Image (cartoon, rainbow, N blue to C red):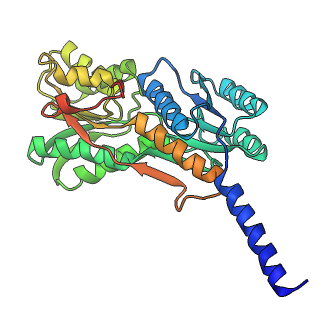
Amino acid sequence: MKPFKTLALAAAVMAGMSSTAQSAELNKIGISLGSMGNPFFVALANGAEAKAKQINPDVEVLSMGYDYDLGKQFNQIDNFIAAGVDMILLNPGDPNAIEPAIKRAQKAGIVVVSVDTAAKGSDATVTTDNVSAGAVACEYIVEKLGGKGNVIIQNGPQVSAVIDRVTGCKQELSKAPDIKILSDDQDGKGSRDGGMSVMLGHLTRYPQIDAVFAINDPQAIGTNLAAKQLKRNDIIITSVDGAPDIVAALKDKSSPMIQASGSQNPYHMAEEAVSVGYKILSGTKPEKTVTLLPSKLVDRSNVDQYVGWDAVR
């Protein structure tokens, strides 16, 4: 074969490869999230669908809640594989146990992106910078207390997001040597009832509590209810999420103890997850497998300008 023919053939092959890499189709996407009764996951699903339809207006989006049942999430992933989806977005029921299902999907040529919480084996993860979220919420406490006081860190289920939030909080509190952490190991279960139960115990045990950092908004609301029940009205309460319930509390003058939350943006999180997943599907691996989105503090001074989870976009 003559040299110029060899070069021409090589160029054609490379052009064909480039065209294939850039012409990946997103025809069907499967989404498996904690609960479609939770506004956080509703916003995630809406953001994912909006971004997917920007890529392909005719894309089929299958959004499902596994209702915190890991077995159900396994079945959903297997159903997505059988349905021939191109991409799966998931919030893992168990970050480690879900790996075999992820591997089955990847073996079928499906890109898997985890959102909010990292999942072992996924192609990429998109989540809030939870260290930053915990930090901004506890920086607020330090400022409000003037660097001096007794603080509770109300912990939660030991997933990566919670661990990171507590880490960020401790980083900020450690900058104020006159801040004393009374407790940091009690699990509020990520729920309103759990937060209330833990806080009732703390209020009984400790006569002076100046502030509480709760790892999420439901626990903060439960903490506030416990303080009210025991006639306490002098505690600063902050948390992480920026959920609709905390927005209502921040606007409520009758609940002054709830003062701030390090917000998340699940709608944008899902948009970014689909974008990252589509790039992988098209043959472009991200420089980093974990994308961290910034957290902004929402408090009583700026809550009216805050674009929350349930905002119409």
For the C terminus, which image quadrant? top left
Using the image, determine if residue 153 lies above or below residue 19: above
Q: Position of residue 275 (x, y in %)?
A: 52, 46
Residue at screen point 33% across, 40% down: 184
- Of residues 169 and 296, the one nearer the viewer is 296
For the N terminus, which image quadrant? bottom right
Residue at screen point 48% across, 38% down: 270
Using the image, determine if residue 267 lies above or below residue 222: below
Residue at screen point 46% across, 33% down: 47
| Residue 110 left/right relative to 66 | right
| Residue 310 left/right relative to 298 | right
Using the image, determine if residue 203 lies above or below residue 211: above
- Of residues 285 and 242, the one nearer the viewer is 285
Whether residue 60 is visible to the viewer of this picture, yes or no, is yes
Q: Quadrant of residue 214?
A: top left
Using the image, determine if residue 67 lies above or below residue 52: above
